[in-house]
Amino acid sequence: MIDLLAQAAQQHSVLGPLSVHLVVFLLAILLGFEVIAKVPATLHTPLMSGSNAISGISIVGALLIAGLGEGWVKYVFGFLAMVFATINVVGGFVVTDRMLAMFKRK
Amino acid sequence: MDTTQILAGLLAQASTQQVTELLDGAAVSPVREFLVNIIYAIAAIFFVFGLKMLSSPRTARRGNLVASVGMFIAVVVTLASAPGIGYPVVISGFVVGGLIGLVAAKKVPMTGMPEMVALFNGSGGLASAVVAMAEYWRVNAYSDLLIDARISISLTLLIGWVTFTGSFIAFLKLRGQWIPVFWSGKESAKDREGGVKKDTAGNPIMQWKRYIKMGNPLTFPLQHPLNLLIVLAMIVLCAVVAANPAAVWAVVLIILISAVLGVLITAPIGGADMPVVVSLLNSYSGLAACAAGFVLHNTGLIISGSLVGASGLILTNIMCKAMNRSLLNVMAGGFGQDTSAAGGTSVEGKTVRQMDAEEAAMVLEACQKVFIIPGYGMAVAQAQHAVAEMADLLSQRGIEVKYGVHPVAGRMPGHMNVLLAEANVPYEQLADLELNSEMEQCDVALVIGANDVVNPDARRPDSQIAGMPIFDVDKARTVMVCKRSLNPGFAGIQNPLFFLDNTTMLFGDAKKMVSAIVNELKQS
């Protein structure tokens, strides 16, 4: 394992970006804990639905892979990833808005 | 505005300059990468503020909009910066997925919300998994994959597929779907008899032994050892892929086993615990997107994915606390299937008092203070509008009406609030467990379709739901319970509340019963 890491570091200097990504990951996790901790129970369902829509960020991954690779990989995986991610994003935000619109009538 | 124009300009310049270099797979321009990462960070800031604004009823709707703007920014910057976008694929995928998502989100009834969220969630998890699969199969010589990409591909496949199949099972369970089974096993009293499907000539095509209801926990022997074995196998397979990325068989096995694992960890969990599972899976789908970010070295995916991962965990934790269960306990499954060992009060030989709508209306009219405790049964019966109408009629007579909404009422936390909001219940009438402090002054506590959240056994240390916060409705002067039968609730344990001296049962469908009360109130 250490060999592989050393080899990877040598060839592509991967550890630099990886460490930055890990730091970003940890900080974002902590931020997520703080943001969510103060939501009243009333809004938990819209919140779950809204954050679920944000997890549709995998649409970024879908966009990136849709242009790469060759032949069937590009088309089949690219198309499927786009469809599933878009369902998550569009459906998630629309359904959350529908719920919150009901609260707003008060 | 100026800043965005400058940024866009720089971006366009950078991309035209570097495009040949990028297509050759050479090093990414530092300037461009810097700008792209900054804009991803801006998108993440939109997400954070969106989530923050979702915390307050006044700003919640705008918060959702802010978050969707963040998503728009992330998509645009990706389109502007990626080395070659497959536009036909992207556009066709977007149109198909967008239409499905839009129609589903517009059509779903409010009671079906938890299922819908579960499905959307599974869809996002699957998208991440497909991204990892594409990244794996796109690299022709697999050994080109770096060690970190190998590990994160395995992790993305694992989390993504578990999220997908787990969410799908959660969807079926939340719908209470009956599914045919073809094998004979231990039958439970809750099963329904099987059937035969025949072709037009009357010859049998398919025969199934029985139906099982997906809402019930599905346990089988050696479940925990099997799960442990699967986890160990996963670790070995990930190590195999890390050491030798050309091991396609290991990647395929990871996909298959993860899909099975998603089913195995969701199937044993009973209907009562589904909110926790949906919330946990929501967290997983974020983590899957985050892992996909590590595969593609994309900061946008990493930040946003981990934000959702953290939020899902916090919600899961809150829900577990509300039900007084530990997450481990929930995941172990099987809760609420064994009524005999539940440690509740025995109900044999006890009698219940019952009333019809006319009497109930008379009692309610004579009150000063009425608390309504709605449960999921009210939503199933679509009775929320009738209940709101009844509450209005009572308020018009100067009776103080309040709704006691338990944190886990409905099938997701806050679900009941959405249902009541749909029925135009004024926000001021909603209260949570704080209602207990006024319970002794309450003339009638009207429990509609709720069960476990008013079970006084929760105060007994030997009960299965011991310590779960409940509404102390038994302390009200009169308790009216509107329920179809004396059957136990989601938790599957008996409720001694029904047999108390100050309890009256209103047997029947919640909607019919409440509508009948409304009619009586209108007539008098």
Image (spheres, coloured by chain):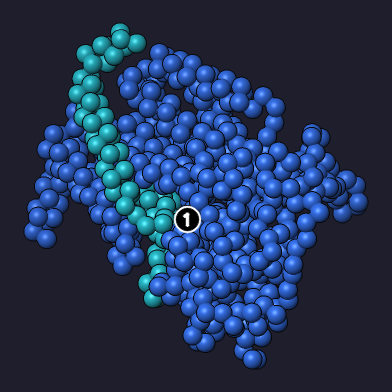
Chain colours: A cyan, B blue
What's the residue at 11%, 47% (across, down)?
B10
In the picture, measured across the screen, residue B347 lies left or right of residue B27, that is right
Furthest residue in direction top, as rendered:
A3
Is residue B30 visible in the rendered image? The answer is yes
- Image quadrant holding the N terminus of chain A, namely top left
Coordinates of residue B289 in the picture (x, y in percent)? 38, 39
- Image quadrant holding the C terminus of chain A, namely bottom left
Q: Would you name the residue on which mark 1 appears?
A: B407
What's the residue at 59%, 45% (across, down)?
B460
Coordinates of residue B491 in the picture (x, y in percent)? 63, 47
Is residue A60 visible in the rendered image? The answer is no
What's the residue at 64%, 79% (across, down)?
B363
Q: Secondary structure at mark 1?
A: loop
What's the residue at 75%, 63% (across, down)?
B352
Residue A8 location, quadrant:
top left
Coordinates of residue A51 in the picture (x, y in percent)? 38, 51
Which amino acid type is marked by label 1?
Pro
